Image: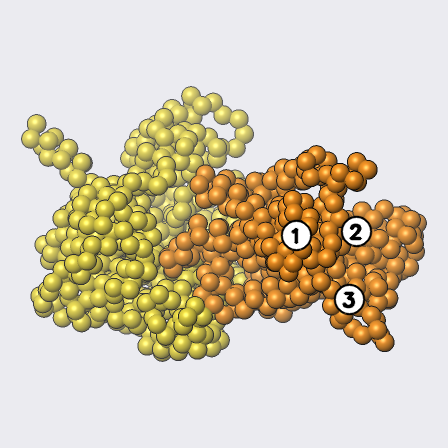
């Protein structure tokens, strides 16, 4: 048996869209094999078929040389295929051991299981406390549960879907050690990512997908990050140009000891967040997912009202009590993380979605309570033209657009107003490289024209590309904003881990 | 062979209009089968049920009488449901409106002027709104589920009505029948001749005109105004609604007051026309049937007007089937239930398409 898993001419069609087009690839035992590609290249669909969650339209899979069909994830696990999804399926209110027990087939002994969890987690450098309640754990620790859950079933192939997206740089390093050790024991790993440095560092083999097709199968050690990127995108990537002249003006957005209580058992409380964003600069808030980013966005946008008006000021006006439209009316604009269902109504056309955020600030859109569909269509056409939004119909429903094109529209809709203050959460989450470059360039250009821009992002590469100053959010606390040139990803990683741990390490060092 | 639902890229407009037609066709087929199982000729039975009610001018008049409250309530419910506010208690708001409006003739039987009419109608609307305000308040204040509270309140107000007409509001000269005094003159809705004697004659009352006005006004609101936009956003994407700065609480109030007010108006119009007094049974379940009207009418006020006629036929058909075929007039409710079931099922075809797959997936580890 030379290959553990082979995919031969696999095709998957959704409606009229060929998501995987004649994909052929081979994975050897003990190999860390990267699937590299932009969002929408078909990586997730491919692994979902390997894991049995989807069925190929045509083509064949071979497992240890034998042709197989994998009708369900249960069948995949039986074959020895484990998968760690990007979005964890854990019950927050249960303990680590209980969560793992839920996934075990047949009867089990809780005590023995806890012992096994402790042993496996220790052996692979994934420290876990079986009795800990999931709600209290960090995202990195939650990911460990998912990995241990797979390892307990002694897989021959482990699939990891963008595992480092939710980790601090230090946590990612720890994960790489574990994966290398697994591979050393003969377990194959399929590693999905679009982070080139990581793939170069960790993987033995790279299959690059573009528009559903395999475009290359290369040895990452012999490639540069730039050559991998070219293969992935199919051309050169636009580099964001930002004249980094320090022409900082007056403070346009000010958060002053902003506090916001948690509004649910799993929401994060914001504690004393202070930040100033001046005219002409881009300030980024870095942090691992789930540390208060969405709460910060809700507080700044006005979707949740603040206890005191002075906690938030726009151009010197205290606006903590004002709602999202009042803040828009004084020149602020907001782009939330979730495009569909938050930033845009999926079933509404693009021009109707223009009305969604601009009905209060644009006098031309609503006249004496009546919506002007002509006015909305005009704005929508302008945004589509300026931001090169690709679409099938003149005024399609938002949900029919690809992620990148919808993001260009949602960002463009706000930038078209020339806002004085822009707050944008995860500007390029799940967006292809071309659209991401367009959006980043537009953000930088807006700042250079005198606006204040606050970017909340989990993508460090993105942050270093566009930010003038960087603050880090951790467990609802925001660090001081440091000039981007003073920070390295290591330092940000330490800040991400939280001020508490930093103090603890300092104490430990002194002791 | 396998049947799968495959998601469409965009909602199908064609299916949105075809779905109620398919649903009606499936209802007729199912109804025919039920009649056949009961030993009746399905074609005769369906004819008696659905066609006969349209053959005389008297029955067309009755059709309009029955369609009036259905359209009025259905249009209000359509707007509510579209905004994701589930008012299941229109029957109760109808009753509350009828009770409050009837207070005028009960307490001031001799007060007769055009103002009587205006006052009774206004009190009807206020009664419906006030009763609709209860679930709205409970939802906004305590987060209760409005489906449950509004539905349970129906039975409360029906018992109140029962108590009133058997107790304090009973007609002293009414031989102990559970009813109030009979309304007269300005306590009744004026009638208009819609179609002249030479063809009809067909009379309609003021309620039908209110229903048409309500439908047009709501259609305009939903189609053109920012309020309509707000309600539609709240219905399909509440998070986006919040991002747009629309208040969910305000929407809950608005929808309950609107649909409750229209239900109250329908209630007072019923007692001021067909019934002519307050008694325990003032509505054959119009408030519940109006939910079906709203869905059959695509949650569109104009659609609700058309759907009201379809459901009105089922009421009349039930009556004529009772006479001609000797089956219970509850059959009408069976038809209404089947219809709602099929509409909801067919609506999934708006976002999904049906596809037949030839191959069935083999189980794990097929031959090499």
Q: Chain of mark 2?
A: B
Mark 3 or 1, nearer chain start: 1
Point out which mark residue B332 bears. Answer: 2
Colour seen for chain B: orange
- Check contact, mark 3 vs mark 1: CB within 8 A: no
Residue furthest to the top in view is A111
Q: Chain of mark 3?
A: B
Q: Nearer the observer, disc 3 or disc 1?
A: 1
Which residue is located at x 20 percent, y 54 percent?
A318
Mark 2 or 1, nearer chain start: 1
Residue furthest to the left in view is A510
Q: Secondary structure at mark 3?
A: strand
Colour seen for chain A: yellow
Point out which mark residue B111 bears. Answer: 1
Image coloring type: by chain
Pointer 1 local density, CA inside 10 Å: few below 14, some 14–19, many at least 20: few
């Amino acid at each position: 048996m030379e290959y553990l898993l082979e995919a031969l001419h696999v095709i998957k069609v959704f409606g009229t869209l060929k998501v995987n087009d004649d994909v052929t690839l081979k994975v050897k035992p003990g190999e860390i094999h990267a699937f590299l590609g932009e969002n929408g290249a078909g990586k997730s669909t491919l692994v979902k078929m390997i894991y049995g969650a989807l069925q190929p339209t045509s083509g064949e899979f071979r497992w240890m040389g034998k042709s197989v069909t994998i009708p369900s994830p249960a069948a995949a696990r039986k074959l020895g295929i484990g998968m760690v999804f990007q979005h964890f399926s854990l019950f927050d209110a249960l303990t680590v051991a209980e969560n793992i027990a839920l996934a075990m087939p047949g009867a089990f002994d809780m005590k023995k299981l806890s012992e096994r969890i402790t042993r496996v987690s220790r052996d692979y450098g994934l420290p876990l406390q079986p009795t800990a309640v999931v709600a209290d754990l960090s995202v990195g620790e939650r990911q460990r549960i998912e990995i241990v859950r797979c390892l307990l079933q002694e897989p021959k192939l482990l699939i990891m879907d963008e595992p480092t997206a939710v980790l601090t740089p230090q946590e990612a390093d720890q994960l790489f050690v574990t994966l290398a050790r697994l591979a050393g024991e003969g377990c194959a790993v399929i590693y999905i990512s679009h982070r080139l440095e990581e793939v170069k560092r960790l993987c033995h083999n790279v299959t690059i997908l573009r528009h559903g097709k395999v475009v290359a199968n290369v040895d990452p050690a012999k490639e540069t990050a730039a050559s991998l990127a070219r293969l992935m995108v199919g051309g050169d990537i636009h580099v964001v140009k930002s004249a980094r002249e320090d022409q900082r003006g007056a403070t346009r957005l000010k958060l002053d000891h902003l506090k916001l209580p948690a509004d649910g058992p799993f929401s994060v409380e914001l504690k004393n967040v202070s930040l100033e964003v001046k005219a002409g600069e881009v300030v980024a808030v870095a942090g691992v997912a789930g540390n208060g980013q969405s709460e910060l966005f809700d507080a700044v946008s006005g979707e949740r009202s603040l206890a005191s008006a002075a906690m938030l000021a726009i151009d010197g006006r205290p606006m903590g009590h004002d709602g999202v439209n009042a803040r828009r009316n004084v020149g602020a604009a907001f782009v939330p993380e979730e495009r569909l269902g938050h930033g845009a109504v999926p079933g509404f056309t693009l021009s109707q979605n223009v009305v969604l955020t601009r009905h209060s600030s644009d006098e031309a859109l609503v006249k004496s309570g009546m919506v002007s569909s002509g006015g909305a269509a005009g704005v929508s056409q302008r945004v589509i033209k300026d931001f090169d939004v690709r679409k099938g119909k003149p005024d399609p429903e938002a949900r029919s657009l690809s992620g990148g094109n919808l993001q260009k529209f949602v960002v463009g809709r706000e930038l078209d107003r020339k806002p004085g203050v822009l707050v944008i959460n995860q500007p390029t989450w799940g967006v292809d490289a071309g659209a991401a470059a367009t959006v980043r360039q537009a953000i930088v250009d807006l700042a250079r024209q005198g606006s204040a821009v606050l970017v909340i992002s989990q993508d460090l590469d993105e942050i270093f590309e566009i930010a003038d100053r960087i603050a880090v959010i951790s467990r609802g606390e925001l660090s001081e904003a440091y000039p981007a040139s003073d920070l390295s990803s290591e330092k940000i990683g330490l800040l991400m881990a939280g001020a508490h741990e930093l103090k603890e390490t300092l104490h430990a060092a002194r002791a | 062979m396998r049947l799968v639902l495959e998601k469409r890229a965009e909602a199908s407009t064609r299916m949105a209009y075809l779905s109620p037609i398919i649903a009606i066709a499936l209802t007729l087929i199912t109804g025919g089968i039920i009649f056949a199982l009961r030993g009746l000729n399905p074609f005769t039975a369906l004819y008696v049920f659905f066609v006969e009610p349209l053959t005389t001018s008297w029955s067309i008049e009755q059709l309009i009488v029955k369609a009036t409250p259905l359209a009025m309530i259905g249009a209000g419910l359509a707007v509510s449901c579209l905004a994701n506010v589930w008012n299941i208690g229109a029957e109760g708001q109808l009753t509350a409106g009828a009770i409050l409006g009837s207070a005028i003739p009960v307490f001031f039987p001799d007060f007769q002027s055009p103002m009587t009419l205006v006052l009774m109608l206004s009190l009807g609307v206020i009664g419906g709104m006030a009763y609709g305000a209860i679930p709205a308040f409970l939802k906004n204040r305590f987060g209760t589920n409005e489906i449950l509270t509004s539905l349970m309140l129906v039975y409360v107000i029906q018992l109140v009505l029962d108590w009133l007409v058997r107790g304090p509001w009973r007609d002293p000269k009414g031989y102990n029948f559970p009813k109030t005094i009979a309304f007269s003159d300005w306590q009744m809705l004026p009638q208009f001749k819609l179609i002249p004697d030479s063809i009809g004659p067909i009379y309609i009352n003021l309620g039908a005109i209110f229903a048409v006005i309500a439908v047009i006004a709501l259609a305009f609101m939903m189609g053109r105004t920012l309020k309509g936009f707000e309600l539609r956003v709240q219905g399909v994407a509440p998070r986006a609604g919040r991002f747009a700065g629309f208040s969910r609480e305000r929407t809950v109030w608005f929808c309950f007051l609107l649909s409750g007010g229209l239900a109250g108006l329908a209630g007072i119009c019923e007692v001021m026309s067909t019934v002519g007094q307050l008694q325990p049974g003032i509505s054959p379940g119009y408030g519940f049937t109006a939910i079906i009207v709203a869905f059959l009418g695509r949650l569109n006020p104009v659609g609700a007007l058309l759907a009201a006629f379809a459901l009105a036929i089922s009421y009349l058909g039930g009556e004529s089937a009772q006479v001609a075929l000797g089956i219970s007039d509850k059959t009408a409710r069976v038809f209404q239930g089947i219809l709602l079931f099929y509409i909801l099922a067919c609506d999934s075809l708006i976002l999904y398409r049906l596809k037949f797959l030839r191959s069935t997936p083999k189980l794990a580890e097929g031959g090499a």
